[in-house]
Image (cartoon, rainbow, N blue to C red):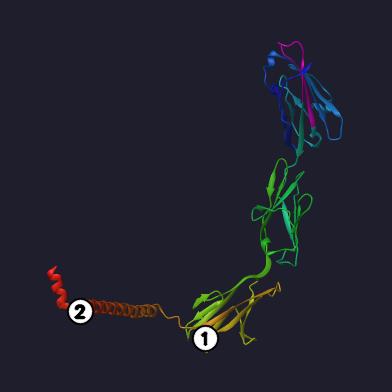
Amino acid sequence: MQEVNSEFVHVPSVLNGVKGKSLLLSVETHFQNEDVEIQGSWYQTRPGGPKTLLVTFHNHSAIMVASMRHRNRFFFQPPNASLLIPRLDEAAEGGYHLDLDIHFPQRQEFVRVERTIHVTVDVPVSTPVIRKTPSSTVVEDKENVTWTCWVENGTRVQYQWLRNNMPLDASDCHQFSQDNSTLVISPVRKKDIGQYRCLAKNHISQRQSHTLDLNVFYGPYNLAVKSDHGLRTGEVFTVNPGELVFFDCQADSNPPNSCMWISKTNNATEVITVGLRLEVTSYKLAQAEEFLCRAFNNVTQKQDETQFTLVVASLGTGKERYVQESNSFSPLAAITLSCLLITGCMLLAYFIKTCHHPKRVLMNIYNR
């Protein structure tokens, strides 16, 4: 007896079934059944259990079913060697072994085929439910958040967490339980803000939970002073004399930060005003003056500050600059013209001196 080439018989290695549904353990034979003699048996091996004979068959007839309790649990219709499980339950899980003895007319001996199909039986997952603790807005770098996901129905459930529809991976701040049903963010940071949902899945189904928002108190970040007036170069603002100038102190902060404006003169500081906007009248400034904006978040207890220098100088309007450019061109033209006239006079004087007398020069030219 020898083993037949695998191309003649094919079975799936794994089948995932749904509890209460039917499942066909299909056997594909790549030869003409009417030309061969087939004898075989189906066995089941449950996890941790013995190998149990289910059915023995020979060509067009089933010889026997091992026991009466298996008759209603399995259906066999020769000459097809496939086995049907009409209704799956937990007892149907395990390995199903097929032993075949095949006799081909052109061969003198039987060939042996042994195949195994691993069957799983699962309950579809229900829609998962998620919970966030604490449910209120949390403070960055000070508080933690615990996410929990569970399903009422489902077997062998695996969980996955998503933020803004992107999968979350484990990191220093993101820790998962063994089955991923729990996610702990410690500590919470601004980057953790977003919409969270849980994906529950098993071999036969998957469902997503509704979304929950995570809000975080953070900042201030990216503090900057801005103004629509004057000319800015780096940290220096230059404005026209007498101009009324407004400065805005802007930062990324939740909740919005409070601002304090400070004047720095001769190594001394003075609080000018409190608020997001500073108003300065330039004619009151005798010289360049330094200012500082200090932003403070009352919830995170974090602060940041930035400083700038205000200089009063005439910038002029577009018309004035055009006139200045025109005026600056006229002296240059006059100087150029003067230089040309002086050079011409010098050449003429040199010419006269060299020739001694203009009339003699003309006669010499005529004689030539």
- Quick one: SS at disc 1? strand
Start and end of the magenta stretch? 95-114
- Determine which of the numbered discs, if any, sits on residue 281 in the image: 1
Mark 1: amino acid = Thr
Report whether 75 appears left or right of 286.
right
**Residue 180 x %, y %:** 76, 51
Q: Do the residues labelled 2 and 1 touch (CB within 8 Å)?
A: no
Q: How far apart are marks 2 and 1 (CA)?
A: 75 Å
Q: What residue type is labelled 2?
A: His
x and y percentages locating residue 307 in the rendered image: 60, 78
The residue closer to the viewer here, 305 or 46, is: 305
Q: In this view, does 276 lie above or below 145?
A: below
Tell me the residue that label 2 is attached to. Answer: 356
Label 1 Cα neighbours within 10 Å, binned few <14 / some 14-19 / many ≥20 = few
Q: Is there any visible trace of residue 72 in the rendered image? A: no
Q: In this view, does 291 lie above or below 183?
A: below
The residue located at (74%, 33%) in the rendering is: 14
Residue at x-position 79% and y-position 29%: 96
On whether residue 109 falls in the magenta region, the answer is yes
Q: Is residue 238 left or right of residue 269?
A: left
- Quarter location, residue 132: bottom right
